[in-house]
Image (tube, rainbow, N blue to C red):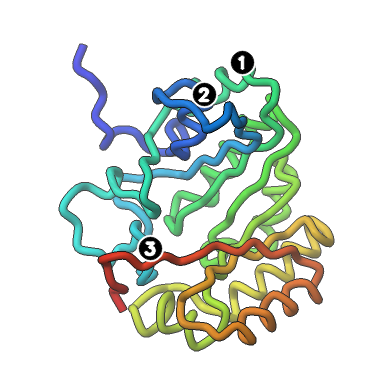
Amino acid sequence: MMKKSSFNKESPEYVRISFAAAITLGFMPGKFFRDAKLYCLNLLLTYNDGCVGKCAYCGLSKSRVRSKPWVNQSFIRVDWPIVPLKEFIKRMDEYPHIERVCVSMITHRKAPEDTLTIVRNLREKTDSISSLIAPTIVNEGWLCKLKDAGADKVGIAIDAATPKLFDKLRGKEVGGPHRWSWYWKIAEKALEVFGKYNVGIHLIVGLGETEEEMVMTIQKAYDMGALTHLFSFFLSRTRFNA
């Protein structure tokens, strides 16, 4: 029988998983330094036509010139292999130390409904499910559905620390669909649905902000009742698409 092409492997039946998750669940060979264990499995929705976002710093950006198909791209510097969701869930039984699963969306028309489907399936194995959502394509009603499906925490990747940087790297200046005000609006609604400290704001350090601007944005999130997660942007030999 011919091996199924990655072009036929789309969510919700298939998901991309982090390299660390792939090693943990035995999808890829490898071991962790000093026998460390991974306690949170990260998965990402996948579609042949990819994400409609044009974020200048992202390897999955629609505007990036591609030498290979979108499904073979990664938004960071390690592989995110595509695996069957059923097999992913089945293997979770073999690793009782796993405490949480995070379902990450991309900005794609099918992602809202498929995210709900995936969360419902995962709920059969665990009640600790986070979802890194795509605010551009969701609303308050959908957030309620996400909670009903079984998610107990939400992440929102605002990334850029100021409205100007957000617009320059994710919004109008790069022809992207994302809007600063809507991201924060969804963060407010998510707090209403999921409760204080059950919403996390992702921020990337090193996109051009000052330390003061980053601290002010962290404070803004905290004042709302959200936690913040900081990531470091590392620019090697590549450049922004902006």
- The residue at the point 57 percent across, 79 percent down is 161
User: Is disc 1 placed on a helix, strand or loop?
Assistant: loop
- The residue at the point 43 percent across, 33 percent down is 14
**In the picture, residue 98 is in which quadrant?**
top right
Q: Which residue is mark 1?
A: 94
User: Is disc 2 placed on a helix, strand or loop?
Assistant: loop
User: Is disc 3 placed on a helix, strand or loop?
Assistant: loop
**Could you tell me if the residues under marks 2 and 1 are in contact, i.e. CB atoms within 8 Å?**
yes
**In the picture, residue 217 is in which quadrant?**
bottom right
Q: Quadrant of the C terminus?
A: bottom left
**In the picture, residue 221 is in which quadrant?**
bottom right
Amino acid on which the number 1 mark rests in the picture = Glu
**In-front residue for pair 85/23:** 23
Sequence-wise first label, 2 or 1: 2
In percent of width and height, residue 51 lies at: 37, 57
Mark 2, residues whose alpha carbon is within 10 Å: few (<14), some, or many (≥20)?
Answer: many
CA gap, disc 1 and disc 3: 33 Å
CA gap, disc 2 and disc 3: 26 Å
**Is 7 situated above or below 235?**
above
**In-front residue for pair 98/163:** 98
Q: Is residue 238 left or right of residue 180?
A: left
**Is 183 situated above or below 77?**
below
Amino acid on which the number 3 mark rests in the picture = Cys
**Could you tell me if the residues under marks 2 and 3 are in contact, i.e. CB atoms within 8 Å?**
no
In percent of width and height, residue 142 lies at: 65, 56
Q: Which residue is mark 2?
A: 25
Outermost residue, left side: 67
| Residue 58: numbered disc | 3
**Is 216 situated above or below 118?**
below
